[in-house]
Image (cartoon, coloured by chain):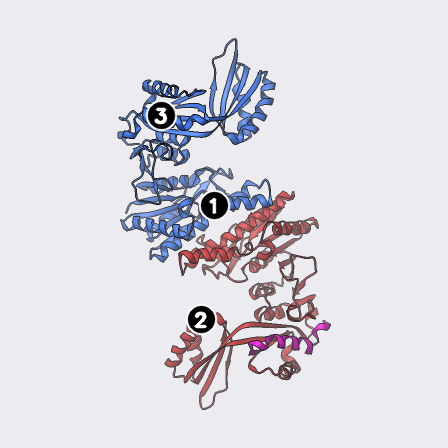
Chain colours: A blue, B red
Amino acid sequence: MAIVVQKYGGSSVADAIKIKNVAQRIADTRNKGDSVVAVVSAMGDTTDELLELAYQVNKHPSERELDVLLSTGEIVSSTLLAMALKTMGYEAISLSGAQAGIRTDAAFSRARILQVDSKRVVKELDKGNIVIVAGFQGITEDMDITTLGRGGSDTTAVALAISLGAKVCQIYTDVDGVYTADPRLVPDAQKLVEIGYEEMLELASYGAKVMHPRAVELGELFNLPILVASSFNNSSGTLIHGGTSMEVRNKVKSIAYNLDIAKITVVGVPDSPGIATAIFQPLAAAGISVDTIVQNASINNITDLTFTVAKSQLTKAMHLVESIAKSIGARECVSAANLGEVSVVGTGMQNTPGYAAKMFSTLSKQGINIQLITTSEVRITCIIDETKVKDAVRALHLAFELELE
Amino acid sequence: MAIVVQKYGGSSVADAIKIKNVAQRIADTRNKGDSVVAVVSAMGDTTDELLELAYQVNKHPSERELDVLLSTGEIVSSTLLAMALKTMGYEAISLSGAQAGIRTDAAFSRARILQVDSKRVVKELDKGNIVIVAGFQGITEDMDITTLGRGGSDTTAVALAISLGAKVCQIYTDVDGVYTADPRLVPDAQKLVEIGYEEMLELASYGAKVMHPRAVELGELFNLPILVASSFNNSSGTLIHGGTSMEVRNKVKSIAYNLDIAKITVVGVPDSPGIATAIFQPLAAAGISVDTIVQNASINNITDLTFTVAKSQLTKAMHLVESIAKSIGARECVSAANLGEVSVVGTGMQNTPGYAAKMFSTLSKQGINIQLITTSEVRITCIIDETKVKDAVRALHLAFELELE
């Protein structure tokens, strides 16, 4: 019997009726003859409610305690799902992250999986059980509970699938796959039947909220096929894999966007070694995630350094950067919070300059000014005015003929 | 430094403000120079809410899954309490039952503690931490989560206190001690400064809801002093202990009552060996707890057998007993659900027949008909009409002059 690992997000198990629906989907998979391991997130808004409770007693709760608190959310949903399966006549058992052997480091609130010891899961599968695993959590060497941070349950599912040698990891969520663009913006957007790991990584990193990049990365490392599909219907979803059909396509796959962009420019920086470290190390230490970084060519050994952060972190970042700028002799710092970004993603873009030209000319025809550009092997991103992002997505979707996908 | 183990019930940690109050009480104890381990129950109605969720997905949830689900309630309150202490500047850490080394058998929903491995608790105390332990739960040899059933958190606290060699176990609840009678019924009721284990056991078993008998029993076995007091004020509470001052008192300590009594009589039972087993073994197997059992002297080898159960179990018990009665050739079964019981509790009652006579005459003067009588070394109990119970408690409190306590 092959093993299938499924993951159901919080909106898929938000109440008793949805939990029963998910149980039925799991049962359907079981009935096809596969062994099933299902990883679940906490019900609906549980995590936010627990956080709210924590902040009522402590404005800065310890991460160790917060992790234990939050881990209960997934335990609740996992037991309820096991109960729902049992009432339908299936053998099922719930396991916490600890019981499922998810061993992590001790970086509370953002732990990394060190190892999956799937002995107990295998034992329960061998007994004929459907195994329901509480996602998003693990246990340290010292038997302390950790949580995995953003994208945690997806990562639990992919890690378990790899450890168990599962044939596929199915991520069930509230969207029914990966689209050529956000269907709410672009009515003509098409669902992709398949996509490569790298393209998916770029899409996930650049605004498509379908899946967190760290789970995709893990899947790529072990070449595990990952299906992204909806838990609310039976449409076929999108398969993320590394098959050869990816290589020959060599075209734009999807348009991603992100409205949460703020920009800081340090103007008149003396261009000497160590300047980037002086700026970005304190930001990292303060937990500020820096996205795109662009350094202009230096003139007379003076350069400008621009980078983007999430809008919510702009004030904190600006505060830090202003004092750094002073200490390194930069002229001034300027910031802008009204930005967004739009990306075109597809394999082999770097080798096909026509794509970049087409992107820039499309934006230009729309009268959209490009403020920053960054590229990777499979992506071109332009930072533009926030109010122009949606128009840009629609125009690019049309220009790259993605409605014909 | 001596170790004090405290236990706070669900009503004491029902919301963020109450949790902060409890944290302050724990801090006060710590400030007096003792090491503190605090065991907590789930917040307010959490357990009922989790049960409600379970029944929404499965009318008969598996006990293994239910235990995992319910155990999250105490984990939530323990982390919040640790956070509250930390925000006040105290070092604190929460531990689940499993982490605190509460090893149990695998009797889900009613597990018994087999052993307490307090290594981790000791390690955290040695580091200077206040240790908050999630009550009511443990872990089996196979690393499955169990709950301890009724009185579970009290039992966790007493077991930990014994294992740690604590000087006292303090049970903080919503009443401020053990009274000579329920103060809501008897305005003159007096709080007892101290009480013996056996008297407390009888009180707990016969209707005083202050503490569950199993925790008292465990305390008695290891001669651990247990203080019962309120978490809402600073009154001194009642100390349960085995000191010699108990032995010489030799008088009635308290009047207990219970309104949840139903009676079944099997009429015309052929009096032969094995009849009791034939009746009570199937009841036990069905999880029906039988309280008082009375068998009349047999006439012509035919006897009547009467016993009491909780009202909620009467229908189920009657159903079972009727088919058993047929198979053993009994004449008929009759039941009554409108009963209650009243008990007088004190040391040395068995050796002082005057007490029983005084109890019976007091009830008789009130026009109260006694339906069944049972006694123990430290208790006399009469089963009477439910509507007469409160009058009986008041009359007995007066007759035994407990207002002078």
**At x 63% / y 43%, what residue is drawn?**
B87
Magenta range is B383-405
Q: Could you say which disc has been placed on residue B284 in the image? A: 2
* Quadrant position of residue B387: bottom right
Quadrant of the drawing holding the C terminus of chain B = bottom right
Viewer-side residue, A382 vs A363:
A363
Viewer-side residue, B378 vs B329:
B329
Instruction: Identify the residue at the far right of this view.
Output: B404
Q: Decide whether residue A211 is among the magenta residues.
A: no
Residue at mark 1 shares a chain with residue at mark 2: no
Residue at mark 3 shares a chain with residue at mark 2: no
**At x 41% / y 39%, what residue is drawn?**
A155
Spatial distance from mark 1 to mark 2, Cα to Cα? 42 Å
Residue A319: percent from left, percent from top: 59, 26
**At x 48% / y 60%, what residue is drawn?**
B111
| Nearer mark to the viewer, of 3 and 1 | 3
Q: Which residue is mark 1?
A: A45
* Quadrant position of residue B384: bottom right
- Callout 2: chain: B
Q: Which residue is mark 3?
A: A395
